[in-house]
Image (tube, helix red, strand yellow):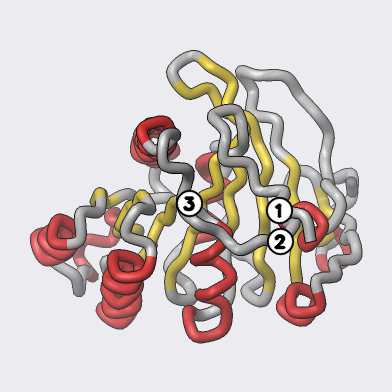
Amino acid sequence: MKDERTSSQGGPLRVAVVGASEVGKSALTVRYLTKRFIGEYRSDTDMLYKTVLQVDGVAQPVEIMDTSASCDESSDAHLQWAEAFVVVYAITDKESYRWAANTVQELSERRATASVLMLGNKSDLGHLREVEEVEARTLALTHSARFSEVSTAESCAPVAEVLDGFIKEVKSQRNSNQGGGSPKLRKISVTKMLGSLIGRNSPPPTPMTHLIILDKEERNKLQTPMRRLCRPCLRPAHSLPCSPHTAV
């Protein structure tokens, strides 16, 4: 099968958002791309967002995979697909931090050249904190990962600042690796695997974002029928009383 992964400077930057359940991965991704906060999401699907962002004043294609499955179920697929990782945990959930810590360690061992951001979410719930910032920051430093704490629910500006900076770093890292090639990824057509794009084009500086939904079973079969989405909600229209919202 032809390898359609693009390693050139003009190709899409591929970022996987990983973490335990209910840490806010989907909320974080949608907050960053749309500035909206939506608290409820499907938990059994991977979602791929294809967008164009401004990085150092230049339009840069970016693909962000909002993952749903646990590390045991799909780590190999995500590890081989992405060149950068946002590892999310909730500061109110010690178990989610352990999940994140194990993942950061795994990435340092298996994908040493990848850019990694360890992100503590729900910083607005400090009174329920179970993970101290210094502990997480020290762990990230040990594995040469970036670190930050944010509140996806509270404000979009800090989220945008952190992720803009990380994506800028990912692009810089790719440019510095041009001589030796980009990190090794599995030879598979991600576009064919994930299916057809859903959405409308809109020119920069407003991000041009397409959403693709991939069910676990369909991912394993490399088949993905299209699902109708409510454009304002970015959720399957059949599951919502979306009127007068418009499905895409």
The reply to whether callout 1 and callout 2 are in contact (CB within 8 Å) is yes
Determine the CA span between mark 1 and mark 3.
Answer: 15 Å
Secondary element type, mark 2: loop
Q: Residues within 10 Å of mark 1 (few under 14, many from 20)?
A: few
Q: Residue at x 11, y 66 (%)?
A: 135
Determine the CA span between mark 2 and mark 3.
Answer: 15 Å
Name the kind of residue labelled 2 in the image. Ile
Q: Residue at x 44, y 75 (%)?
A: 20
Q: Give the labeled residue for mark 3.
A: 83
Q: Nearer the viewer, mark 1 or mark 3?
A: 1
Which sits in the foreground, 186 or 41? 186
Q: Residues within 10 Å of mark 2 (few under 14, many from 20)?
A: some
Q: Position of residue 102 (x, y in %)?
A: 30, 77
Q: Give the labeled residue for mark 1.
A: 3
Q: Give the labeled residue for mark 2.
A: 188
Name the kind of residue labelled 3 in the image. Glu
Left or right of 140 in this view: 48: right
